[in-house]
Image: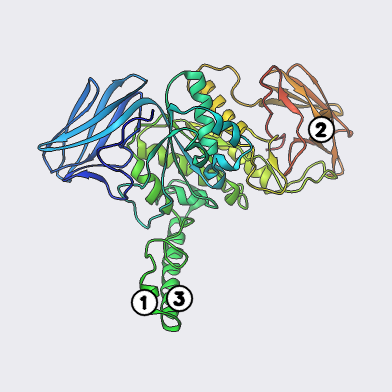
């Protein structure tokens, strides 16, 4: 039987409220609080005392002059037993029912994070599973804003045959695999919009310390103002030519003809991330990059800055696991190397994982569809994200990350790649390219021996690349039952 309904219905856009006492909508029925120390926060009458209670754990706070308060429930233990979260101030009391404690992750990005279970190859299996009260997803409504706001629209849903088809597939499959291994409840806060660039998901000023982004903030601000002026003129023209009354009904904070849009710089941050700041989480998973693939090198500082801005806002460098983009677009079997933007943005993702504190990546180079940028097989994507978390965050798995090249050496007419663990070759060792003295790429022939792969095919090769194409051939996998694919590689970075 599903847990009781709340005393307050929490699907509205304003802060949930019992008079002056207010909390954000995340603190609602069926919520998952982060195990350990979990912050509970909101607004109350300035100077008033606020008490917070979850089971036997209690905390107090005093509202500041601005009415804001934060209380920390310390030492929470993971539990599937739903309890009432009771918040009181003076004569006012707010209660959220069936609140549990476990691991909380944010899932964000563009359409492939937004892709629901119903549209995947694993939909039937997911729907056939019994309801799991320890697996929950909060889906943030798509609400870009011109300025940061205090709350989001949405509600927590338990994974069940009735709800699962409408939940984020990547987020759910990640949470399910994680839960199966750590034996704790897992909650995902899903906030994403299809077709969006990374610039939309970070706060204004996030490039302040990036030399390559000099004047970027000023340029984007001017662009936003110019767009607003142009749209104002367009709206005026529509009013004259068509119907003033209809124009008056147009929403002024969203929509085709409004100055706020999902790809506007910082606008998804303002409406869909900023309100979440302060909610205690273990980490974040990120599936995005398709819309930034046209500028693959800039992605290093765009996404890198965005991740750092999230860390700064939350006050901690929590794990941030990136889905390295899978294969896409037509195969070109006649080319040994295809030096295009998609292999380069995959390389930028790897660079971010290596250089930005807290950042990690999962490799998916053996997945994807030629003619669909939205591959239907989201199950391994979610599971591989969980593998990385299990290795790097929870320390319960030895090989969660993909094999990596530790060293590349030219030895005579061969390149010898040394991986960080034993690997095996599948698919006849395809996917390698060698650059000859004539600066032409030729197909390489590969042989594996333990952790080394020797690639031959041309005299005195100048460079070696692997899986360097939009839709490359793939052959290198970690040895053993898991068989994780090695990511794209080039020796001349």
Mark nearest the camera among 3 and 2 is 3
The earlier-in-sequence mark between 3 and 2 is 3
Residue 272: x and y in percent read 40, 47
Q: Secondary structure at mark 1?
A: helix
Report, in whole angstroms, how far the alpha carbon at label 1 lies from the one at label 3: 15 Å
Quarter of the view holding residue 336? top right
Q: Secondary structure at mark 2?
A: loop
Quarter of the view holding residue 446? top right
Q: Residue furthest bottom?
A: 240
> Can I make out residue 385 in this image?
no
Q: In the rendered structure, are the residues bearing label 2 and label 1 in contact, judged by CB atoms less than 8 Å apart? A: no
Q: Secondary structure at mark 3?
A: helix
On screen, residue 469 above or below 484 = below
Q: Nearer the viewer, residue 344 or 198?
A: 198
Q: Residue at x 10, y 38 (%)?
A: 91
Q: Residue at x 55, y 39 (%)?
A: 117
Q: Quadrant of the C terminus?
A: top right
Task: Judge from the rendering whether residue 453 lies leftward or rightward of residue 289; answer left or right.
Answer: right
The earlier-in-sequence mark between 1 and 3 is 3
Q: Which mark is residue 430?
A: 2
On screen, residue 66 above or below 1 = below
Q: Residue at x 25, y 38 (%)?
A: 7
The earlier-in-sequence mark between 2 and 1 is 1
Residue picked out by circle 1: 245
Residue 93: x and y in percent read 17, 36
Residue 231: x and y in percent read 44, 71
Residue picked out by circle 3: 234
Report, in whole angstroms, how far the alpha carbon at label 3 lies from the one at label 2: 54 Å
Report, in whole angstroms, how far the alpha carbon at label 2 lies from the one at label 1: 63 Å
């Amino acid at each position: 039987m599903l847990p009781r309904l709340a005393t307050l219905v929490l699907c509205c856009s304003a802060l949930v409220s019992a008079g002056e006492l207010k909390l954000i909508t995340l603190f609602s029925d069926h919520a998952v609080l982060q195990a350990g120390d979990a912050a509970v926060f909101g607004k109350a009458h300035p100077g008033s005392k606020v008490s917070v209670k979850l089971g036997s754990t209690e905390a107090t706070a005093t509202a500041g002059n601005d009415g804001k308060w934060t209380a920390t429930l310390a030492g929470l233990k993971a539990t599937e037993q739903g309890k009432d979260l009771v918040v009181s101030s003076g004569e006012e009391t707010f209660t959220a029912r069936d609140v549990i404690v476990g691991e909380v992750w944010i899932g964000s990005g563009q359409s492939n994070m937004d892709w629901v279970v119903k549209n995947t190859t694993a939909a039937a299996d997911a729907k056939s599973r019994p309801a799991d009260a320890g697996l929950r997803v909060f889906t943030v409504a798509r609400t870009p804003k011109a300025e940061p706001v205090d709350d989001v629209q949405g509600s927590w849903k338990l994974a069940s045959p009735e709800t699962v088809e409408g939940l984020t597939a990547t987020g759910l499959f990640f949470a399910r695999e994680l839960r199966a291994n750590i034996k704790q409840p897992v909650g995902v806060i899903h906030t994403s919009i299809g077709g969006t660039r990374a610039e939309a998901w970070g706060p204004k000023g996030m490039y302040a310390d990036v030399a390559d982004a000099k004047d970027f903030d000023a340029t984007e601000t001017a662009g936003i103002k110019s767009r607003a002026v142009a749209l104002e003129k367009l709206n005026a023209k529509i009013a004259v030519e068509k119907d003033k009354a209809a124009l008056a009904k147009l929403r002024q904070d969203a929509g085709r003809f409004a100055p706020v849009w999902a790809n506007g710089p910082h606008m998804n941050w303002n409406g869909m991330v900023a309100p979440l700041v302060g909610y205690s989480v273990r980490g974040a998973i990120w599936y995005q990059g398709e819309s930034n693939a046209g500028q693959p090198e800039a992605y290093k500082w765009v996404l890198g800055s965005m991740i750092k801005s999230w860390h700064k806002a939350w006050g901690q460098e929590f794990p941030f696991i990136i889905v390295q983009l899978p294969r896409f677009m037509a195969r070109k079997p006649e080319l040994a190397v295809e030096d295009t933007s998609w292999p380069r943005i995959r390389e930028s993702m790897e660079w971010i994982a290596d250089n930005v504190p807290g950042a990690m990546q999962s490799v998916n180079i053996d997945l994807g569809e030629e003619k669909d940028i939205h591959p239907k097989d989201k199950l391994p994507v979610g599971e591989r994200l969980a593998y990385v978390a299990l290795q790097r965050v929870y320390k319960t798995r030895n090989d969660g990350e993909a094999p990596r090249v530790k060293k590349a050496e030219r030895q005579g007419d061969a390149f010898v790649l040394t991986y960080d663990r034993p690997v095996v070759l599948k698919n006849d060792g395809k996917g390698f390219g060698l650059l000859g003295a004539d600066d032409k790429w030729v197909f390489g022939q590969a042989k594996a021996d333990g952790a080394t792969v020797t690639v031959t095919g041309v005299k005195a090769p100048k460079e070696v690349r692997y899986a360097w194409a939009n839709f490359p051939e793939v052959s290198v996998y970690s040895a053993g039952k898991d068989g994780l694919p090695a990511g794209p590689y080039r020796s001349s970075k």
